[in-house]
Image (cartoon, rainbow, N blue to C red):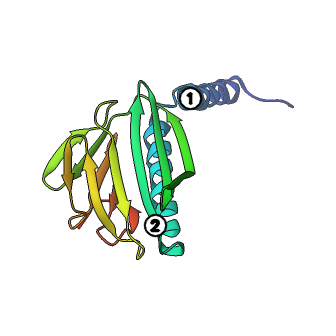
Amino acid sequence: MKGFTVIELVVTLVLISIVSVTAYSRWFDTSSFDATTLRSGVLSAARVAQRIALSHATAVVTLTVSRSGDQYTASVTETIGSVSQTAFSASIVTDTAVTASAGGSTQTLSSSVPLQLTFDSLGNVTAVVLGAVTTTGSQGVQLVTGSLPLCVSPVGYAHEGNCV
């Protein structure tokens, strides 16, 4: 006897069906990846901002995270004297909510509530503007994208996870 039995063929078809349904839901529903992509973009921008601040002693470096509709923009601006230039900019389209906490204030980022961090020449966070609230960077900034936390510590170190 050559070939497969009916039971082997049915089991194979059932397994292929299970794998294809799982792959289909992951392939076409990217919402689970949106929060991770957004957090990675903001994390990269924060690290770029700190590196630029460390490499240019006379520059004022500002990281701004803002939202317009479903698009978040993380941009790093370097100002030397009266000359400003955008050193880095990343745009991420997602409907994931971002909550920022700084200086006792917690707000969800929106078009009217951007987050702005200013770095000194040592890479430390010296000022935090969250919407209409301005604080020093002495406590750091906690961002949560979806359910994924991101922390920018007072010394400017940006990392995944909660602020300690």
- Circle 1 sits in a helix, a strand or a loop, which is it? helix
In the picture of the structure, the residue carrying the numbered disc 1 is: 18
Of labels 1 and 2, earlier in sequence is: 1
Q: Is residue 52 above or below residue 149?
A: below
| Left or right of 106 in this view: 126 | right
Kind of residue at badge 2? Gln
Label 1 to label 2, Cα distance in Å? 47 Å
Quadrant of the rendered image containing residue 43:
bottom left
Name of the residue lying farthest toward the right: 2
Kind of residue at badge 1? Ile
Q: Is residue 148 above or below residue 11?
A: below
- Please state which of residues 117 and 140 is positioned toward the viewer in this rendering: 117
- Circle 2 sits in a helix, a strand or a loop, which is it? helix
In the picture of the structure, the residue carrying the numbered disc 2 is: 50
Question: Where in the figure is residue 155, as x and y percent of width and height?
Answer: 33, 72
Q: Is residue 128 above or below residue 144?
A: below
